[in-house]
Image (cartoon, rainbow, N blue to C red):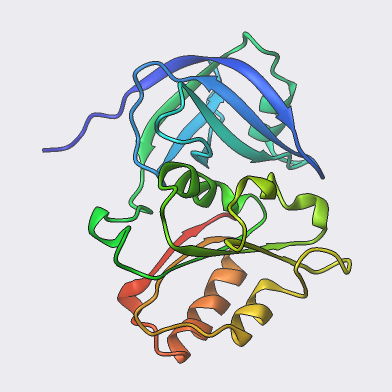
């Protein structure tokens, strides 16, 4: 039986500015339920232009947050940036299977690899499952793009910075991944640009990670 997709109108509560053109939108949540790792489709009310965004906030939060990169040529991101608190937005979802099965949350080694705003679902995982055993690798150009990195427990987050010698590692996240000891049974989640995902897949498969343990969400 197919699940009916419901489009609902929500109110923009707040916009929180981050570095280098990224921002977090806090939306009225209502009765929306989701599983960490899922995404929603959002756009201005009455517009045909919409985009998919992974949920950034936790399931127990009374609001819904989305991490958004302001793309100069992007119709939706520009419209969302210009929206004022109190503005109506339209939302569909949740959708997606980029989730962690309950039986794996305590029993498996977890590796998260993200670029840019692809960190959104991992922020949700970390908030939703505070006892999760994971390492999060975050590839960014500048240290200022380590979106709210201080919110992660010590030793769980590692920033790979390419354009300056700040952060935890100077270089691409895939270069760091090549040097990282990864057990073959590690459950790996990759989220970000497609080039990173393809390269990371190759690296992890050559390290002996079973393809069934590789999960990806592509941010174009």
Q: Residue furthest left?
A: 1
Going 42% across and 83% down the picture, which residue do you hit? 183
Q: Is residue 29 above or below residue 134?
A: above
119 relative to 213 in the view: left or right:
right
- Rendered image quadrant of residue 45: top right
180 relative to 28 in the view: left or right:
right
Quadrant containing the C terminus is bottom right
Q: Position of residue 70 (x, y in %)?
A: 73, 39
Q: Residue furthest top?
A: 86
Q: Residue furthest right?
A: 164
Q: Position of residue 162 (x, y in %)?
A: 80, 69
Q: Position of residue 116 (x, y in %)?
A: 67, 55
Going 34% across and 82% down the picture, which residue do you hit? 210
Going 47% across and 34% down the picture, which residue do you hit? 41
Q: Position of residue 109 (x, y in %)?
A: 39, 70
- Rendered image quadrant of residue 154: bottom right
Quadrant containing the N terminus is top left
Going 64% across and 32% down the picture, which residue do you hit? 76
């Amino acid at each position: 039986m197919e699940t009916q997709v419901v489009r609902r109108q929500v109110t923009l509560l707040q916009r929180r500015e981050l570095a280098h053109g990224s921002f977090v939108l806090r939306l009225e949540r209502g009765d929306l339920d989701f599983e960490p790792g899922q995404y929603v489709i959002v756009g201005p009310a009455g517009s045909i232009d919409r985009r998919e965004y992974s949920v950034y906030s936790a399931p127990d939060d009374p609001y819904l947050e989305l991490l958004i990169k302001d793309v100069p040529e992007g119709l939706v991101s520009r419209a969302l940036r210009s929206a004022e608190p109190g503005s109506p937005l339209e939302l569909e979802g949740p959708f997606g299977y980029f989730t962690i099965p309950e039986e794996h949350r305590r029993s498996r080694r977890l590796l998260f690899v993200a670029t840019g705003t692809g960190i959104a679902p991992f922020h949700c995982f970390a908030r939703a499952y505070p006892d999760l055993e994971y390492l999060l690798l975050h590839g960014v150009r500048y240290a200022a793009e380590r979106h709210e990195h201080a919110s992660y427990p010590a030793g769980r987050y590692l920033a790979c910075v390419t354009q300056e010698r700040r952060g935890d590692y100077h270089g691409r996240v895939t270069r760091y991944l090549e040097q990282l000891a990864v057990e073959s049974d590690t459950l790996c989640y990759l989220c970000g640009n497609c080039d990173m995902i393809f390269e990371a897949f190759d690296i992890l498969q050559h390290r002996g990670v079973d393809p069934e343990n590789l999960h990806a969400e592509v941010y174009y």
